[in-house]
Amino acid sequence: MNRIDRKSEVISRGEKVLMDTYNQKDKVMLKGKGTYLTDIENNEYLDFISGIATNVLGHANNKMIQTLTDQASTLIHSSNLFWNIQSIQLAEKLTQFSGLDKVFFCNSGAEANEAAIKLARKYGRETKSDSGIEIITMNQSFHGRTMGTLSATGQLAMHKPFAPDLPGFKYIPFNDSKALKNGVDDKTCAIFIETIQGEGGVNEISDEFIQTINTLQKEKQILLIIDEVQTGMGRTGTFFSYEQLDLDPDIVTLAKGLGGGFPIGAMLAKDAIAKHFGPGDHGTTFGGNPLATATAKLVLTEIQKQSLLDNVQRQSKKLINGLHQLQEKTHLIEEIKGKGLLIGVKLTVDVAEVIDKSYENRLLIASSKGNILRLLPPLNVSTAEVTECLEILEKVLDELIKENE
Ligand SMILES: *Cc1c(COP(=O)(O)O)cnc(C)c1O
């Protein structure tokens, strides 16, 4: 059997047995090392998707392999009927980095946000009233795919096939201070935001909106929940994106980059809020297991040890400068948005076409809502790899210009 046959065999077998929920590209990935992925036909790709902002240390990181294998051969899971040291050490680090007090571990971003919704509702019920459980979320937000987090997600077209929604959410336009002020009433217990809407178009929060949130949070005793599932873990150049902003979250959620590609999520909260959860209020069988928490602890240690936050800021500048040069040269770029290594590039040509051509030229990049390319390299991406990405993008845009002449 030659290689092409093997790929088509994998895909046809996959189509038979896997539910059709992902619209996969016509590629089968076999292995990775650093910022590169290799497919079944032995093509090597520069990976600026990083498992959708998860593989923050790149693929097959040696220290991660060591931690995973050591911990797997010691203890993978023993349940939350008992304490485990790894989860405590990880929680100590997360509270130290975030300034928040308590941590709940789970296994994904949606689960972290579910936990946040439950905690905010219980807080609202216990400090306001039985109806004080409403949460304000933003249009174009993305908080996950479970019924609760789908209902929190401000993209109503996504809700329709799964109606009825979980009640208790109010949607307002992102960065619209007037709508936020008008939206808040006696029933409001929390405002739920992303500082950069990663899936919704790489839209950044405005300073004015931040000030409005701060005022409402103080005056009306409303919680601020920040979904840092995509923006957290150093992605924007600080551990949490809110560190660069004048925001004081009561609850923060994390997942994606937390395990460096290994599944784990977390919800962090201030003591005064966290104390509204008691035994039995929330839980998960796998949450905080030693394997996931040992791995996440290693990821945090490596981000610090290798000064990866500095690298994010350095490579971000280089990437954004290069994109601005491409913008001047090609006129196919309308806008460059985002922060750190969460960069959005709004195109005047079809983003799907640019992505396909990039794949042909061995560069993996993602998209976001609104004809936007999304670049998400690992936090330890090198200068040479950023240069390579820019060169491939230039070649792709040049090809498109020639084709349209
Ligand atoms: C990816 C994402 C989620 C959902 O995370 P899952 O691990 O896929 O459940 C939630 N919020 C934001 C901002 C995300 O980017």
Image (spheres, rainbow, N blue to C red):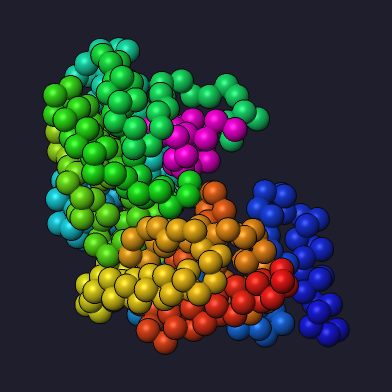
Residue 100 vs residue 320: left or right? left
Residue 272 lies, with reference to residue 364, above or below; the image says: above
Tell which of 17 and 149 is nearer to you. Answer: 149
Q: Which residue corresponds to the image point at 48% horizontal and 49% vertical from the top-left?
A: 201
Residue 334 in the image: above or below residue 327: above
- The stretch in magenta equals 137-157
Residue 141 lies in the magenta stretch: yes
Front in this rendered view, residue 346 or 281: 346
Residue 106 in the image, given as x and y percentages of width and height: 38, 48
Question: Position of 354 compared to 242: left or right?
Answer: right
Q: Quadrant of the C terminus?
A: bottom right
Query: Does residue 365 show up?
Result: yes
- Residue 324, image quadrant: bottom left
Q: Quadrant of the N terminus?
A: bottom right
Q: Is residue 78 visible?
A: no
Frontmost residue, 114 versus 241: 241
